[in-house]
Amino acid sequence: MAHQVETMAYAGEVPWHGLGVEVSNDLTPNQMMTKAGLDWTVDQVDSYATLPNGKKVATGMKALVRSSDDKVLTNIGQIWNPVQNEEAFEFFSEYVLAGDMEMNTAGSLKGGRNVFALAKVNESFSILGEDQVDSYLLFSNPHEYGKAIDIRFTPIRVVCNNTLTFSLNTRSSNFVKLNHRTKFNADMVKEQMGLASEKFAQYKEMAEFLSTRRYNTESLIQYYNEVFP
C-alpha cells in the first residue's frame, strides 16, 4: 500500500485513496487529533535482548512504545525528546482560533511511525482566474529513529505517505527541521518561520508574475540555456 495510511481524518475533498474519517472544517486541532485516531502518546522504555539461554540483558538502548496498543514503534538512544501528538496539534491552536487557518487533514502513517497534521491557510488566489493555489502549514512528527521533525508551509495537500514525502522533498523557503536530541520549543519555531500571510503574499506575487509570461520554442530553449548552461 503506497499510501501507508493507518488512521486519518480529512475535511473537504476525499483523498485519492478513499480512506479516513470525513470531518467538518471547523474542528479545533485537538478535535482533529481525536477524529484522526491520534490521541495516543509514546513512552520510552528500556530495551532488552534475549540470549539463547533465555536470559534478558539490557541493550543500552530504549524502545519507543505507543500507549494505545503497546506497539514498539522504533528503537532509540538514551537521548531522545519525543514530541507528543498533542504538542504537535497544539502548535496550530492560536492560528485556528484566530481564524487564520483551518484543520484540513491529519493521520498516522507507516503504522504510527509518522504522524502528520495539516492546516489550510485561509488565504488563496487564482492564476488567470482558473488555477487555484492554496497554502498549507504542515507538521510532520515522526516517531522513528533517524527522522527529523519538519514544519513547513507547502502548496501540497498531504493525504498519504506519497504526498508527505513529496512535500518534504520539495524546496521551501519557509521551514524548520528539528532533531530529537533537543527539547521542542514551539515559540522558537514560530518565531523562525514568521507569519503565514507574509510568505504566502510573496508566493502569490511570484506566481501571478510567472503566469503572465508567454513563450515559444525558441525562447524556451534560450531560457533553458541560461538556467542550465
Image: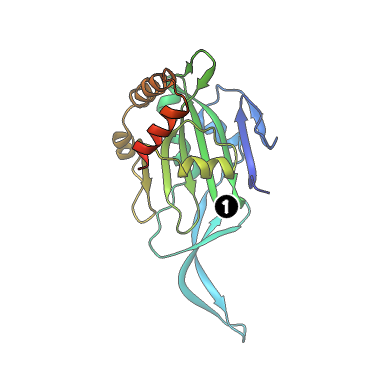
Residue shown at the point (49%, 50%) measured from the top left: 142
What is the quadrant of residue 106 in the picture?
top right
- Outermost residue, right side: 18
- Outermost residue, top side: 129
Instruction: Work out whether residue 150 or residue 112 is closer to the camera in this orientation and state it.
Output: 150
The amino acid marked with disc number 1 is Ser
Is any part of residue 91 visible from this angle?
no
Is any part of residue 159 visible from this angle?
yes
Residue shown at the point (53%, 60%) measured from the top left: 74
Residue 5 vertical placement versus 133 (above, below): below
* Quadrant for the C terminus in the image: top left
Instruction: Work out whether residue 81 or residue 116 is closer to the camera in this orientation and state it.
Output: 116
Residue at image mark 1: 67
- Outermost residue, bottom side: 53
Instruction: Work out whether residue 97 or residue 229 is closer to the camera in this orientation and state it.
Output: 229
Badge 1 element: loop
Residue 127 on image: x %, y %: 48, 17
Residue 14 on image: x %, y %: 66, 29
